[in-house]
Image: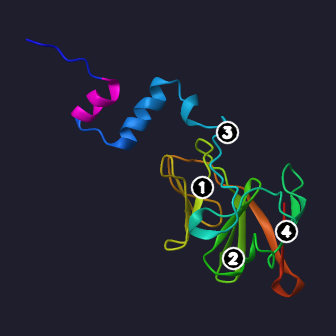
Amino acid sequence: MEQTQLSRGQFLRQLGLNSAALMAFYCMGTGLTACSGSGNDDPTPTTNGTGGTGGTGGTTSTAVKGTTSGSSIDFTIDLTHADYSKLKTSGEFGYVSGIIVINTNGSYVALSKVCTHEGSTIAYRSASNDLKCPNHGSEFNLDGSVKLSPATQSLTVYKTEIQNSGNTLRVSA
């Protein structure tokens, strides 16, 4: 009987694993660092835009002014700036540093964007008006409280204030 040597990918395909499972297997086989890119596992996008695409990136935009991290959070967002203009639309959300900002029917909510379970970036779900962690399924209410575990700690809630005839949003601790 003749033996044929299969590559790892061929073997896994014969087992019926799809490409996502193959990639996960590859990542595990190479020590995970091969799949993490820069080594930064923060999935916050750095592109412009908000809402279903995951919101805006960091605070390099001229639309954000003030302190966006640490214990003395106090910054303003120019809602007329292209990077954040979608935040004027109900149901849209964006990220500013470690904070997720959400427009809920003309009112704004700002919370820490990091799931208290294992530190993944959460996203707003307008259909259920809550936040969900993509890793293990923790869900949070808009007041920061845990709606569904495995997370057990609430998210940090920040104060929001609409200023400048609705064109600026202030977020503070």
In the displayed structure, would residue 145 be above or below residue 164?
above
Residue 122 image label: 1
- Tell me the amino acid under the disc marked 4: Ala
- Disc number for residue 40: 3
Q: What is the CA distance from the residue labelled 3 to the residue labelled 2?
A: 27 Å
Residue most extreme to the top: 1
Q: What label sits on residue 105 in the rendered view?
A: none
The secondary structure type at the circle numbered 2 is helix
Q: Crowding near pointer 4: few (<14 within 10 Å), some, many (20+)?
A: some
Q: Residues within 10 Å of mark 2 (few under 14, many from 20)?
A: many
Residue 132 against residue 149 in the figure, above or below: below
The picture places residue 50, in percent across and down from the top left corner, at 65, 69
Q: How is the image coloured?
A: rainbow
Magenta stretch bounds: 7-14
Specify few, some or many for label 3: CA neighbours under 10 Å numbering under 14, 14-19, or 20 or more: few
Residue 132 highlighted magenta (yes or no):
no
Give how far across and how far down residue 66 sits, in percent.
92, 61
Three-letter amino acid code at the position of disc 3? Asn
Answer with mark 2 or mark 4, whichever residue precedes in sequence: 4
Secondary structure character of the magenta stretch overall: helix
Q: Earlier in the sequence, mark 1 or mark 3?
A: 3
